[in-house]
Image: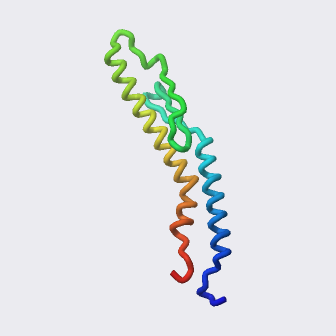
C-alpha cells in the first residue's frame, strides 16, 4: 500500500463510529430538558434538547383580573419570550453535543484529496 492510498476499511470503521456517536448525541438531546423564562420567572417554558416544547408554566401573579385585555397581551409576550429563551438554550445544548461531531465530519478530509 502506498502512503497516499486510502484505507477504506479504516474509513468505514470511522464512519460507523461517528454514526453511533451521532445517534447517541441525538438521543441525549431528545432526553434532555432545558428551561427558558421571562418576566422574572412569571412564565417558564421547558423544551427538550431538540427544541420541542414540553411544558409551559404561567404564574398566577402574571394575571391582573382588573385588566384582562392587557393581561392577555402581556402573557402572550411573556410566553413568546420564555419559549425563545428555552429554544436558545436548546440550540446551545445542540451545539455542545453535536458540534464536535460536525467538526469531525467537515474537518476530516480524505487522504489524497
> Residue 43: x percent and y percent?
47, 27
> Residue 10: x percent and y percent?
67, 74
Q: Residue at x 46, y 17 (%)?
A: 61
Q: Nearer the viewer, residue 90 or 50?
A: 50
> Residue 91: x percent and y percent?
49, 47
Q: Residue at x 65, y 58 (%)?
A: 20
Where 87 sits versus 42, above or below? below
Q: Residue at x 53, y 50 (%)?
A: 94
> Residue 38: x percent and y percent?
44, 31
Task: Return the residue found at the far bottom.
Answer: 2
Q: How is the image coloured?
A: rainbow
Q: Residue at x 62, y 88 (%)?
A: 3
Q: Nearer the viewer, residue 26 or 58?
A: 26
Where 1 sits versus 37, above or below? below
Where 66 sits versus 25, above or below? above
Q: Is 78 left or right of 23, judged from the image as shown?
A: left
The number of numbered badges drawn on the structure is: 0
Instruction: State the image quarter where residue 73 is shown.
Output: top left
Point out the image quarter for the N terminus: bottom right
Task: Return the residue found at the far top.
Answer: 66
Amino acid at each position: 500500500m502506498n502512503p497516499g492510498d486510502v484505507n477504506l476499511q479504516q474509513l468505514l470503521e470511522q464512519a460507523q463510529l461517528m454514526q453511533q456517536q451521532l445517534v447517541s448525541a441525538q438521543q441525549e438531546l431528545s432526553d434532555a430538558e432545558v428551561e427558558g423564562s421571562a418576566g422574572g420567572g412569571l412564565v417558564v417554558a421547558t423544551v427538550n434538547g431538540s427544541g420541542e416544547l414540553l411544558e409551559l408554566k404561567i404564574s398566577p401573579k402574571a394575571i391582573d383580573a382588573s385588566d384582562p385585555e392587557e393581561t392577555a397581551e402581556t402573557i402572550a409576550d411573556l410566553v413568546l419570550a420564555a419559549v425563545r429563551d428555552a429554544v436558545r438554550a436548546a440550540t446551545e445544548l445542540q451545539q455542545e453535543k453535536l458540534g464536535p461531531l460536525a467538526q469531525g465530519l467537515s474537518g476530516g478530509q480524505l487522504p489524497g484529496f
